[in-house]
Amino acid sequence: QAVVTQEPSVTVSPGGTVTLTCASSTGAVTSTSYSNWFQQKPGQAPRTLIYQTTNRHSWTPARFSGSLLGGKATLTLSDVQPEDEAEYFCLLHYGNAWVFGGGAKVTVL
Amino acid sequence: QVQLVQSGTEVKQPGASVKVSCKASGYTFTAYHMHWVRQAPGQGLQWMGCINLNSGDTFYAQSLQGRVTMTRDTSITTGYMDLSSLMSDDTAVYYCAMEVGGGQWLDWGRGTLITVSS
């Protein structure tokens, strides 16, 4: 089974910008990986932020953006707010299976 | 208003089976895939599998093949996840989530805590 890798933790200042990455052990992440990004706060269910690499849901703040860069999927948080402190998971598609990354804990400090 | 309502917390003995339900409201039920994802205490998310709510076709994670079964009842817009031969490692919160298809994940249920303990 493929392994999906994220940085375990990052720290960002309020108002700053941070980019999270999502890499696949099988090679470059592409549009057909259909990357999704989820936000999870303690004690809550995950919430889908980004689907199909770049698309925001109606409930996703515009400061969250997804893209592909250097063979990885990325999630960029701009103008970071205190309420963005959470764990972020990426998800990649492999044929008939999906694999989550290990999660990236974002601390706003 | 779209909503996914899951069944309640359960405690099971090792070796037993558990069936978790996920009632979908506000959706055109058969237009979606329902995924099941679990999260062990303090751990990340693990994709378990999915069911095409129209055709009933299922796809399961390799690690759970033979122990997991996903079904649906379109008449009551409810999906089910059945996990057998439970072990302590199966202790987790189990989530259902909807996908339109083509990789567009949408909403999640609030989760169901399953504890496996003797």
Image (tube, helix red, strand yellow):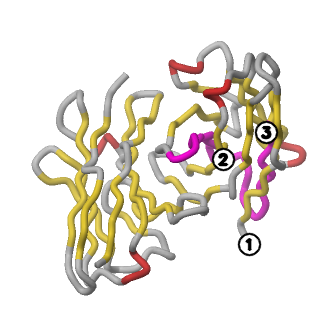
For residue B20, the mark is 3
Residue B86 picture quarter: top right
Q: Which residue is drawn at 72% across and 24% down?
A: B69
Q: Residue at x 81, y 52 (%)?
A: B23
Magenta residue check for B36 = yes
Residue occupied by mark 2: B96
Q: Residues within 10 Å of mark 2 (few under 14, many from 20)?
A: many
Dot in front, 1 or 3: 3
Q: Residues within 10 Å of mark 3 (few under 14, many from 20)?
A: many
Residue B113 in the image: above or below residue B81: below
Residue A5 in the image: above or below residue A2: below
Residue pushed farthest left? A70
Task: State the SS at label 2.
Answer: strand
Quadrant housing the N terminus of chain B: bottom right
User: x%, y% of residue A37?
Assistant: 39, 56
* Mark 3 in CB contact with mark 2 (< 8 angstroms): yes
* Mark 1 in CB contact with mark 2 (< 8 angstroms): no
The earlier-in-sequence mark between 1 and 3 is 1
User: x%, y% of residue B85?
Assistant: 74, 16
Quadrant housing the C terminus of chain B: top right
- What residue range appears in magenta? B20-42
Give how far apart the Cα atoms at labels 1 and 2 are: 17 Å
Dot in front, 1 or 2: 2
Give how far apart the Cα atoms at labels 3 and 2 are: 9 Å
Residue occupied by mark 1: B1
Q: To which chain does the residue with label 1 belong? A: B
Query: Is the same chain shared between marks 1 and 3?
Result: yes
Q: What's under tag 3, amino acid-wise?
A: Val
Give how far apart the Cα atoms at labels 1 and 3 are: 22 Å
